[in-house]
Amino acid sequence: MSLDKDPVLSELYRTFISGCHILHYQGVLDAYGHLSVRHPNDPKKFIMSQYIAPGTISSRVDLIEYWVENAEPVDPTAAKGYSERCIHSEVLKRFPEVNSVIHSHSEAVVPYSISGVPLKACYHMGGFLGTKTPVYDNANYVRAGVDVPDMLIRNTHLGGALASHFTDSESGTSPDYAVVLMRGHGLTVLAPTIQDCVLRAVYTQKNAAIQTTSLLTHAAYFGSSGTPTSSRPEIKYLSEDESSATLEMTRWSAMRPWGLWLREVEATGLYVNRG
Ligand SMILES: [Zn+2]
């Protein structure tokens, strides 16, 4: 069967392009950042767009197949791709159950990558974050004279180091975390499907905004009332049990926001999806 006639692949292209549009519409991606998906017919390959802003991806012509092993294009004559695709290849390589990855520079989230304030699940929609979100620090892995210390992940060495932060086990091949922050850069999100990954990326950003507002509200209220620091109540984040339970909830309900977000990007007139 020709790949162009493959209904699974055609559906995947449409979903992928819609996912890129939703991530742009929701403000998770701007001109930068990207989505990837593992090839449904060959787990050794994955799909990303060529080097264009996610909101402008419009057809399968914009999509490129890469090898998971080294993030090189399957077709050596393919158009230019994103320089940070090793983020995606190394996460997909390490975790066989992961099929979709998002890398974002979300401005709501970046403060939690540099401030030492841990990003935690603040409400039920952010339950997948749990009680701790790891932070990857590129400075710990940049090799003198080999890697440029510009925070970008351009090779499998740095991509592999980032991927290792998704698990507490040195040799773990199942992720313990859905999100890893990247110091002074952004975040990377993983999930079994494009829809789950988009949901997690959108709600990581919303959760970060809620946490920031909570921290500011807490400091302003108790600071202005003169309450001694030792007497102030702690902000109540979700517990381990609550995080686990709400993770399940967002899993089975992911298609509800997806349906709404899909209609939004279809209705704006900005985005084109020819599949
Ligand atoms: Zn980046």
Image: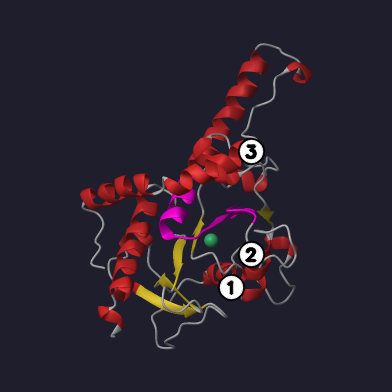
Task: Select label 2 or label 3 by which is in front.
Answer: 3
Q: Is residue 30 visible?
A: no
SS for dot 3: helix
Q: Position of residue 147 (x, y in %)?
A: 67, 73
Residue 50 to residue 19: above or below: below
- CB under 8 Å between callouts 3 and 1? no
**Among the two numbered marks 2 and 3 on one chain, the one whose residue lies closer to the N terminus:** 2
Precedes in sequence: disc 3 or disc 1 = 1
For marks 1 and 2, the one nearer the N-term is: 1
Instruction: Determine whether the residue tagged by mark 1 lies in a helix, strand or loop.
Output: helix
Q: Which residue is mark 2?
A: 163
Q: Which mark is residue 123?
A: none
Q: Is residue 202 above or below residue 66?
A: above
* Mark 3 neighbour class, 10 Å CA radius: few under 14, some 14 to 19, many 20 or more: few
Question: Which residue is located at x 67 percent, y 17 percent?
Answer: 223
Q: Which residues are magenta?
A: 176-203
Q: For this rendering, which residue is in front, 107 or 230?
A: 230
